[in-house]
Image (cartoon, rainbow, N blue to C red):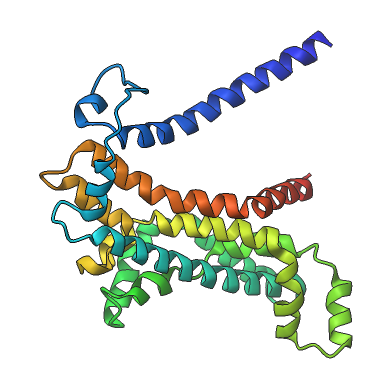
């Protein structure tokens, strides 16, 4: 009994320490966003300084040049991340459904080929991909940001694993009722896969919202830059203070918090379901 209590305390201790390592950088970002550069650079760091410099947020939004490109960058990131997420969810779920529920020769080989692409780092295909979109005239366009990243091998694998246990009886009943094959996917399979869909949507949106490397290659026009590009440019300008830099980062993180808490019910149920299926 005592040994069990000791193990529980030890587990809780490590969980709390691990949680603090995750939360502290976020707390630092939001507290530093309302401080002056002088207080931010103090050692030890004054977590509660009593200072509220809300003008840091105004400087982050208006920019050092006063052209308000940050608002445009927020819209660009939202547009690119949203369209990429919708495309990835649809293509991954459709492919995963086909690999899970349709029996055809070479199905395992196709799955292995898709999964093998996960072993290739993006940096290895970045230049060939860039040359392809340049030849296709998609450089410095939204389509150049979205189309090359629509397909996700991880998304296909996740949806396929989820749909392996989807009841075949529902699919057979729909076929008997005369529903088309695409109708079965659209009206039955997809609406009943919300936990997996929500999980994939959150992961994809976060990945594209934070994506720096690909937009850095593709986009040159200031009005088409995404949030990571804006923050990099904003941080390297001559008259930017550290508080305004933290404010720009804090504003950029808010949509991700909103998305996670809006879909947290499906996200957590999806995680629990995957864990139960693994056991």
Give the residue at x 79% y 44%. Answer: 279
Q: Is residue 154 visible?
A: no
Q: Is residue 222 left or right of residue 118?
A: left
Residue extending furthest toward the left: 238
Give the residue at x 40% y 58%. Answer: 122
Give the residue at x 36% y 70%. Answer: 145
The picture places residue 256, in percent across and down from the top left corner, at: 48, 52
Quarter of the image holding residue 73? bottom left
Q: Is residue 25 above or below residue 276?
A: above
The picture places residue 176, in percent across and down from the top left corner, at: 89, 87
User: Where is the N terminus found, in terms of image quarters?
Assistant: top right
Q: Is residue 40 visible?
A: yes
Quarter of the image holding residue 218? bottom left
Is residue 92 or residue 228 the one in the foreground? 228
Number of numbered markers: 0
The picture places residue 98, in percent across and down from the top left corner, at: 69, 75
Q: Is residue 108 above or below residue 35?
A: below
Residue extending furthest toward the top: 2
Give the residue at x 30% y 61%. Answer: 71
Q: Is residue 108 left or right of residue 117?
A: right
Q: Is residue 107 above or below residue 231?
A: below
Q: Is residue 176 above or below residue 39?
A: below
Quarter of the image holding residue 212? bottom left
């Amino acid at each position: 009994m005592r040994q069990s209590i000791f193990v529980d305390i030890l587990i809780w201790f490590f969980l709390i320490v691990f949680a603090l390592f995750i939360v502290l950088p976020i707390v630092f970002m939001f507290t530093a966003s309302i401080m002056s550069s002088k207080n931010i650079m103090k050692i030890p760091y004054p977590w509660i300084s009593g200072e509220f410099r809300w003008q840091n947020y105004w400087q982050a939004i208006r920019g050092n040049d006063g052209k308000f490109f940050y608002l445009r960058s927020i819209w660009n990131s939202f547009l690119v991340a949203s369209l990429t997420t919708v495309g990835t969810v649809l293509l991954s779920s459709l492919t995963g459904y086909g690999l899970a529920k349709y029996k055809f020769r070479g199905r395992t080989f196709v799955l292995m080929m898709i999964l093998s692409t996960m072993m290739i780092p993006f940096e290895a295909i970045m230049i060939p991909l860039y040359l392809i979109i340049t030849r296709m005239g998609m450089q410095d366009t939204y389509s150049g940001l979205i189309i090359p990243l629509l397909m996700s091998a991880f998304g296909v694998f996740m949806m396929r694993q989820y749909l392996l246990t989807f009841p075949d009886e529902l699919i057979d009943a729909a076929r008997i009722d005369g529903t088309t094959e695409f109708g079965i996917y659209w009206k039955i399979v997809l609406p009943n896969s919300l936990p997996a869909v929500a999980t994939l949507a959150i992961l994809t949106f976060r990945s594209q919202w934070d994506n720096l490397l690909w937009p850095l290659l593709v986009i040159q026009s200031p009005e088409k830059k995404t949030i990571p590009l804006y923050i990099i440019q904003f941080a390297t300008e001559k008259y930017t203070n550290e508080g305004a830099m933290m404010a720009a980062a804090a504003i950029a993180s808010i949509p991700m918090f909103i998305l996670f808490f809006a879909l947290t019910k499906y996200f957590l149920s999806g995680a629990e379901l995957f864990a139960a299926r693994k056991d």
